[in-house]
């Protein structure tokens, strides 16, 4: 049915990239999906749950990975980035670079190498709060399900312990990076987002206070496969916090940081508050906000939070956080509705940081905030958070729409 | 045809150390397989070649690979489509979760191999259902911006689109707009309504057929073959492959908002105000205009939800008031200003105007003065209650989905699309926003969720992709999401059917129609292959080529039940393959240990478990039956919408069966897990095994 | 309940003077939090910002909090919407000088560059008139002796008269200001006398404690300290000079302790003003917008100081231009002393009155 037999290139294997990929292939066209991490799933695979259903992201990803596994029209390359795109719609030439694939695809993830590896690395999957070996399985649900080696921490042939133990000859420590060229018909950019660097918000003292974490870190903290293993523990002393405060718009809607609203942080914090309440019904949660931006049907979710007596919503931006000797945190805000300045001593603080586009090293039209404009030369389609901040549901919607754009006139 | 089965046992990944492979191989020979081989690493090139050569040389048509979980190494174990492949999960579900070299571990491995061999003996390669005359044309219902966008995007992809609109004119609400919100930078200027351009664009495509003043009398059929009966003065019939519905929304009935002044003179809804300006752009606007946000929205007595567009719309209206009328003051009283994402820039632009005044607040009272309206507002940001004297009030009313009843689907389960909440036709809106319970019919725009123009256009494009995808999958005889690519479909032996209608009622996707007697009329292209009908049928009428009452019953019967003096209970565990099965895999990967007395049978959906399997298991001597499915309820995680919910309701029925068999009700238990609940698996299993051990052995054992 | 009737003109005036945006405020309250002075109850400047945005002039003129702000600029630095509440407050104060000015025209001509020539011409004419009446409107012969040009009796008499006059007029403005403050706090009854309350805030005034909490600009406290005490010292020395004219052999010699004190005061002023002016020119980011009124005040004070020193030098060095410079110096003195209630110098009065009132209603700064 398609005149142009060339596949569609999708840059970024997060929720959006994966969605675009499966949606295109299930129409019948071929797709090449590249991802810079050694695993697919992007940011969402690190999340504990989605709002408003409080359901695990891996549930939907499992279905999508199954769709990838059984579909021969989809090819994916992990640890791979795009270097150059030339040509025009229908006839793009792309240059891709794959990091050295020290662990080959025949790895069975049996885990023996992990036991013998002597080197440790901070686990970026857990934002460095835990350590893992230099050879590691990115996470339980990793897709592709195989180990990976951290170039920076592995001692390579001088150690060689993993090579010796591997029964399947799956490790090649002399692997080199590979550059290869492909011809594609169109390009979907699904490079996604990272959260705003909270250390730049100096009056919130994120970098100096251990018990202040960001919202994305919170997701890992509370996850069953995260550092806390379904518990919320303070970094300073591993105690369970009794009073937790959420700081909305931490760096968002702020011309000194991100001038825009990130669209997800309000709902995310409500979700976090409910998660805390489920785990610790006796805890006290305060959410400091400017506007509660819980749009559409998610309003129900807000009502659920408002009905919870242990969660208090305070209209007022937190202007200052100071740490006490007990590593508690004193938040200062004006409670706008009562017109009173207040101080609240929390055991733990979560900063609702916003969405920053991940960026891509290609010559594309971008706006002043580095989001990729949807006005590109024909055949190139930015999608989801690479073009504006949005939640998962909207990203998937956008990704599905991009799937159609990418196969039109093809 | 002779069944030629090859069994391949892998000893890698600790399987060989945990299980006596030689002994296990005997199970295969006892079961009359053609070939049984073992290998230290079946997923290696040599391992694959070993199997592949045997397929070619020995004409094997059924392969059992006893190795790792079927969720892994799928790209390696990729055999021709005419080969039945069964993966026995010896790694995650035996070697990694049980003590090595123990009798119980060996027994589990042997049972699992027996079950696999039995299964391949009892299933066939699915032959896809490929209907004749599959239409590649697409119907788009509703000619507003969503429908128009959908039509254009579909036409661009080369499909013929039938766009129908019940009004005389295309364009819907957009025809009534004076200005539109800018949806990309620069945010400082409002854009002119785009509808004329869009309608003009429609005309550029020969493959778009437009029907105005047209309604739908009836839609019959299934994806690839929808027979649509249109009414346009006369009846007209068209055949389409799939449908996008974009009937849009209606404004919330402002007459219910008398507490906000509606009914008083100069109190308008946002829609009325837009029309007023659109029709009389030169008419002088009053000096003081008040916008009341969330008028009848976020309100439990009216619309409990937020309509997503009203903040932006009021900002837009405020902006053009100021452009048209430099003397006017605009006051906006809000609950929260919800300009999400980059719309924040638009909010900021509108704020820049010196004569637009914002405050959060609650309207306390509105009274009519001589020439004006006096509005008292409490809980404001100004530190006290305020009183505004205004000449006009605009109520920012929300949207109510138009509903899909007008599709007039001739379906057993109703004329429209099922609704999730507040009449929005939606389902798994987070991961799969286009999940539909009427396969091949996709809701787009405000019908699905409250959304603005930009968002509706994105939604329209996505829905069109799904409509196209359904047609292409139907041509291949494949299921669409979530069992994408599945070529099996339900086959009915209607001779035994008692017309009980359970399948027609319980199918979440409305795949079954009924004749006047109540006999099910299957529509395979509507089917999503969940197997819930298999579970619903008391007469075992419904089966898939590779998933049937018989195949599972046979698997159950193939398990060797130790007699009661051995004190080794047996628990049959039906596990939903979507979430619970991966959770069990992860438990194995994590090395979590649990009772070896269980025997797991993966099912397509926990709702596909038939009562017969349960009585078979009890007759066979299983001491208990555990069903593990996805979470039901308002926030259901069941991939087939209400499969796990059905399990709960069917539970009562099953309890009666237990009573008639004089068995304890505890012998059947249902648990719901999330995919990340792998760490709970050992407790769920061990606790149940303990519970069963306390009750004692099944009296049917050895009978 | 307050009736809303936005004063758009006032709002525009605020924006013009402060050069700050106003409308983009989203009422997050960040400014109130980062302000180290704002009290816990009804803190500023968040509420003032919405009043300003809504053009509520009556809420802002006669508002105590406007004068409790010491314009450190922390709120402006941290505002997520790029608004400068500190500058808006400063603009409100500027408008207040005009609002309470008696006679009104003086408030007007001193806060608008257009009227600057008139503002200068008034003292030129009046001083010339006095000199004419004294019969000394000419350059005297011989060694420089300013009393030959402007006899002490005429000088002290006329300036003292005019000063008392303006102070009197200023007091009317202050009384109106105080009444407005009372009106805005109908529920609170002020306690204690003016002097008692003034005494209670002596520490803040004497030690400038309110400046110390400012984090954005550390040098401000020192600069204000130098100028404040330099000026008081100079007033003291001047008062002594008037006394000395009667009892001593005037002019005083360079070694006279009072002369030394006077020169020390001049140096203090010079250094303090230097810091202020440099900050305003080179560190706009932290010090905010400088309005015409800011500059008029700083420059006139600076010219007063520098002309005073030059006039003194001219006397000792017997410069030909000494009398011209002296005339110029007198105009500077006029600008500072006689125009006090109408220029930024008025903050000395308004701020003290506001602080005393705040003390009387127990509105304590942090």
Image (cartoon, rainbow, N blue to C red):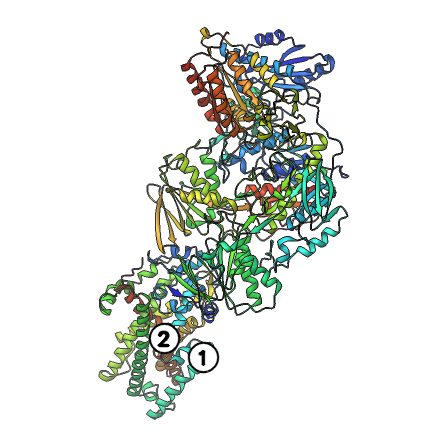
Residue B450 location in percent, x, y? 55, 47
Q: Secondary structure at mark 2?
A: loop
- Residue position marked by numbered label 2 in the rendering: C100
Q: Is residue A290 above or below residue B568?
A: below
Chain of the residue under the numbered disc 1 shown in the image: C
Q: Secondary structure at mark 1?
A: helix
Q: Is residue A29 visible?
A: no
Q: Quadrant of the N terminus of chain B?
A: top right
Q: CA distance from mark 2 to mark 1?
A: 20 Å
The residue mark sitting in front, 2 or 1, is 2
Neighbours of disc 1 within 10 Å: few (<14), some (14-19), many (20+): few
Looking at the picture, tell me which residue is in the foreground, B442 or B646. Answer: B646
Looking at the picture, tell me which residue is in the foreground, C51 or B442. Answer: B442
Residue B426 location in percent, x, y? 57, 40
In the image, C130: left or right of B490?
A: left
Looking at the picture, tell me which residue is in the foreground, B383 or C11. Answer: B383
Q: Is residue B564 above or below residue B531?
A: above
In the image, A408: left or right of A313?
A: right
Q: Is residue A98 above or below residue B556?
A: below
Residue at 38%, 37% in the rendered image? A236
Number of numbered discs on residues: 2
Residue at 41%, 69% in the rendered image? C57
Neighbours of disc 2 within 10 Å: few (<14), some (14-19), many (20+): many
Q: Is residue A291 visible?
A: yes
Chain of the residue under the numbered disc 2 shown in the image: C
Among the 4 quarters of the image, the one containing residue C94: bottom left
Residue A282 location in percent, x, y? 35, 37
Dot placed on the residue nearer the N-terminal end, 2 or 1: 2
**Number of the label disc, if any, that sits on residue A65:** none
- Residue position marked by numbered label 1 in the rendering: C116
Determine if marks 2 and 1 fall on one subunit: yes
Residue at 57%, 66% in the rendered image? B323
């Amino acid at each position: 049915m398609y005149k142009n037999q060339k596949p569609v290139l999708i840059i970024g294997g997060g929720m959006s990239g994966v969605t675009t990929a499966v949606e295109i292939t299930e129409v019948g066209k071929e797709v090449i999906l590249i991802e810079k991490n050694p695993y697919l799933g992007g940011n969402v695979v690190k999340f504990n749950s989605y709002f408003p259903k409080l359901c695990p992201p891996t549930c939907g990803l499992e279905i999508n990975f199954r769709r990838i596994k059984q579909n021969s029209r989809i090819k994916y390359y992990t640890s791979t980035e795009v270097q150059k795109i030339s040509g025009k719609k229908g006839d793009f030439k792309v240059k891709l670079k794959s990091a050295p694939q020290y662990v080959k695809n025949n790895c069975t993830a049996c885990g023996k190498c992990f036991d013998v590896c002597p080197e440790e690395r901070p686990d970026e999957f857990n934002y460095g709060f835990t350590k893992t070996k230099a050879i590691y399985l990115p996470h339980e649900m990793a897709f592709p399900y195989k180990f990976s080696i951290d170039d920076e921490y592995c001692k390579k042939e001088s150690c060689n312990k993993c090579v010796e133990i591997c029964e399947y000859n799956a490790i090649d420590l002399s692997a080199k990076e590979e550059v290869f060229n492909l011809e594609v018909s169109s390009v979907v950019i699904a490079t996604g987002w990272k959260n705003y660097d909270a250390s730049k918000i100096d009056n919130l003292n994120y970098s100096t206070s251990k018990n202040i974490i960001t919202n994305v870190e919170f997701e890992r903290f509370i996850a069953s496969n995260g550092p806390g293993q379904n518990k919320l523990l303070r970094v300073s002393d591993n105690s369970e916090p009794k009073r937790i405060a959420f700081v909305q718009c931490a760096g968002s809607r702020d011309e000194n940081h991100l001038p825009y609203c990130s669209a997800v942080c309000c709902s995310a914090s409500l979700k976090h508050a409910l998660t805390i309440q489920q785990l610790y019904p006796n805890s006290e949660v305060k959410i400091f906000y400017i506007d509660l931006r819980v749009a559409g049907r998610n309003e129900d979710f807000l009502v659920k939070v408002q009905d919870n007596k242990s969660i208090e919503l305070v209209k007022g931006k937190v202007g200052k956080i100071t740490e006490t000797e007990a590593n508690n945190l004193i938040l200062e805000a004006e409670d706008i509705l009562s017109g009173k300045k207040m101080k609240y001593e929390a055991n733990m603080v979560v900063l609702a940081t916003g969405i920053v586009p991940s960026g891509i090293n290609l010559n594309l039209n971008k706006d002043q905030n580095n989001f990729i404009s949807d006005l590109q030369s024909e055949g190139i389609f930015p999608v989801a958070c690479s073009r504006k901040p949005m939640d998962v549901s909207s990203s998937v919607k956008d990704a599905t729409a991009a799937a159609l754009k990418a196969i039109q006139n093809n | 045809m002779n069944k030629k089965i090859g069994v391949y046992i892998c000893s890698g990944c600790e399987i060989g150390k945990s299980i006596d492979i030689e002994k296990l191989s005997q199970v295969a020979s006892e079961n009359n397989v053609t070939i049984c081989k073992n290998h230290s690493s079946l997923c290696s090139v040599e391992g694959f070649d070993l199997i592949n050569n045997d397929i070619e040389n020995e004409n094997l048509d059924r392969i059992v690979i006893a190795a790792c979980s079927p969720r892994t190494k799928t790209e390696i174990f990729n055999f021709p489509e005419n080969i039945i492949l069964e993966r026995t999960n010896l790694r995650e579900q035996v070697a990694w979760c049980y003590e090595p070299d123990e009798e119980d571990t060996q027994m589990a491995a042997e049972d699992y191999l027996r079950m696999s061999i039995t299964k391949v003996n009892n299933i066939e390669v699915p032959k896809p259902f490929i209907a004749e005359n599959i239409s590649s044309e697409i119907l788009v219902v509703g000619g507003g911006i969503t429908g128009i966008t959908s039509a254009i995007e579909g036409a661009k992809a080369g499909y013929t689109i039938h766009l129908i609109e019940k009004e005389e004119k295309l364009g819907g609400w957009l025809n009534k707009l004076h200005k539109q919100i800018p949806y990309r930078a620069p945010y400082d200027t409002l854009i002119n309504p785009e509808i004329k351009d869009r309608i003009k664009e429609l005309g550029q495509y020969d493959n778009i057929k437009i029907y105005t003043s047209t309604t739908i009398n009836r839609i019959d059929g299934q994806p690839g073959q929808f027979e649509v009966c249109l009414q346009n003065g006369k009846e007209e019939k068209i055949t389409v492959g799939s449908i996008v519905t974009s009937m849009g929304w209606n404004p919330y009935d402002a007459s219910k908002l008398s507490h906000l002044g509606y009914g008083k003179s100069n109190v308008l809804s946002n829609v009325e105000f837009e029309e007023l300006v659109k029709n009389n752009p030169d008419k002088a606007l009053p000096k003081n205009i008040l916008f009341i946000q969330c008028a009848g929205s976020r309100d439990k007595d009216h619309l409990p939800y937020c309509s997503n567009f009203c903040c932006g719309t009021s900002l837009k209206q405020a902006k053009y008031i100021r452009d048209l009328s430099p003397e006017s003051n605009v006051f906006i009283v809000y609950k929260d200003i919800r300009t999400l994402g980059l719309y924040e820039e638009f909010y900021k632009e509108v704020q820049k105007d010196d004569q637009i005044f914002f405050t959060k607040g609650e309207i306390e009272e509105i009274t009519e003065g001589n020439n004006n309206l006096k509005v008292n507002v409490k809980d404001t940001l100004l530190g006290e209650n305020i009183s505004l004297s205004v000449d006009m009030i605009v109520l920012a009313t929300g949207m109510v989905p138009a509903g899909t009843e007008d599709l007039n689907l001739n379906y057993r389960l109703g004329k429209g699309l099922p609704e999730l909440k507040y009449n929005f036709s939606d389902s798994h809106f987070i991961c799969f926003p286009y999940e539909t319970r009427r396969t091949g019919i996709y809701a787009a725009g405000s019908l699905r969720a409250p959304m603005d123009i930009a968002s509706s256009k994105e939604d329209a494009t996505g829905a069109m992709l799904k409509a196209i995808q359904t047609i292409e999958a139907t041509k291949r005889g494949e299921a669409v999401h979530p069992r994408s690519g599945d070529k099996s479909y339900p086959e009915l032996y209607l001779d035994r059917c008692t017309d009980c209608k359970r399948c027609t009622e319980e199918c979440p996707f409305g795949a079954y129609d009924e004749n006047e007697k109540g006999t099910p009329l299957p529509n395979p292209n509507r089917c999503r292959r969940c197997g819930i009908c298999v579970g619903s049928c008391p007469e075992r009428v419904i089966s898939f080529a590779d998933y049937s009452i018989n195949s599972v019953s046979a698997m159950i019967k193939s398990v060797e039940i130790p007699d009661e003096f051995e004190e080794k209970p047996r628990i049959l565990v039906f596990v939903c393959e979507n979430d619970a099965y991966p959770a069990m895999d992860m438990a194995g990967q994590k090395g979590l240990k649990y009772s070896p007395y269980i025997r797991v049978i993966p099912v397509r959906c926990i709702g596909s478990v038939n009562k017969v399997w349960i009585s078979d298991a009890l007759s066979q001597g299983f001491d208990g039956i555990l069903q593990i499915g996805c979470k039901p309820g308002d926030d259901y995680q069941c991939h087939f919408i209400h499969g796990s919910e059905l399990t709960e309701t069917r539970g009562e029925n099953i309890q009666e069966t237990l009573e008639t068999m004089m068995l304890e009700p505890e012998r059947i238990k249902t648990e719901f897990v999330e995919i990340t609940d792998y760490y709970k698996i050992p407790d769920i299993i061990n606790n149940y095994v303990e519970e069963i051990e306390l009750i004692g052995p099944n009296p049917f054992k050895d009978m | 309940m307050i009736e809303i009737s936005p004063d758009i003109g006032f709002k525009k005036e605020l924006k013009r003077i402060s050069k700050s945006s106003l409308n983009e405020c989203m009422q997050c309250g960040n400014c109130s939090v980062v302000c180290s002075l704002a009290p816990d109850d009804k803190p500023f400047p968040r509420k003032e910002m919405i009043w300003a945005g809504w053009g509520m002039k009556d809420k802002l003129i006669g508002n105590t909090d406007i004068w409790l702000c010491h314009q450190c600029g922390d709120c402006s630095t941290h505002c997520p919407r790029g608004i400068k509440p500190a500058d808006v407050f400063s603009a409100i104060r500027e408008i207040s000088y005009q609002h309470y000015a008696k006679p009104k025209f003086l408030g007007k001509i001193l806060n608008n560059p257009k009227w600057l020539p008139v503002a200068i011409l008034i003292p030129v004419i009046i001083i010339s008139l006095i000199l004419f009446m004294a019969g000394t409107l000419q350059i005297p012969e011989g060694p420089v002796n300013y009393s030959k040009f402007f006899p002490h009796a005429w000088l002290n008499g006329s300036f003292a008269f005019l000063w008392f006059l303006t102070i009197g007029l200023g007091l009317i403005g202050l009384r109106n200001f105080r009444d407005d403050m009372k009106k805005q706090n109908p529920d609170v009854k002020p306690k204690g006398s003016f002097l008692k309350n003034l005494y209670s805030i002596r520490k803040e005034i004497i030690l400038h404690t309110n400046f110390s909490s400012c984090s954005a600009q550390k040098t401000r406290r020192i600069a204000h300290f130098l100028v404040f005490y330099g000026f008081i010292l100079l007033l003291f020395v001047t008062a002594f000079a008037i006394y000395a004219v009667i009892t001593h052999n005037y002019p005083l010699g360079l070694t006279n302790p009072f002369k030394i004190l006077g020169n020390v005061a001049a140096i203090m002023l010079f250094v303090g003003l230097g810091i202020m002016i440099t900050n305003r020119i080179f560190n706009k980011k932290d010090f905010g917008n400088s309005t015409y009124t800011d500059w008029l005040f700083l420059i006139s004070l600076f010219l007063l100081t520098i002309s005073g020193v030059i006039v003194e030098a001219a006397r000792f060095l017997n410069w030909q231009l000494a009398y011209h410079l002296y005339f110029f110096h007198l105009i500077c003195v006029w600008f500072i002393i006689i125009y006090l209630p109408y220029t930024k110098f008025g903050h000395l009065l308004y701020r003290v009155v506001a602080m005393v009132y705040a003390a009387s209603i127990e509105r304590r700064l942090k």
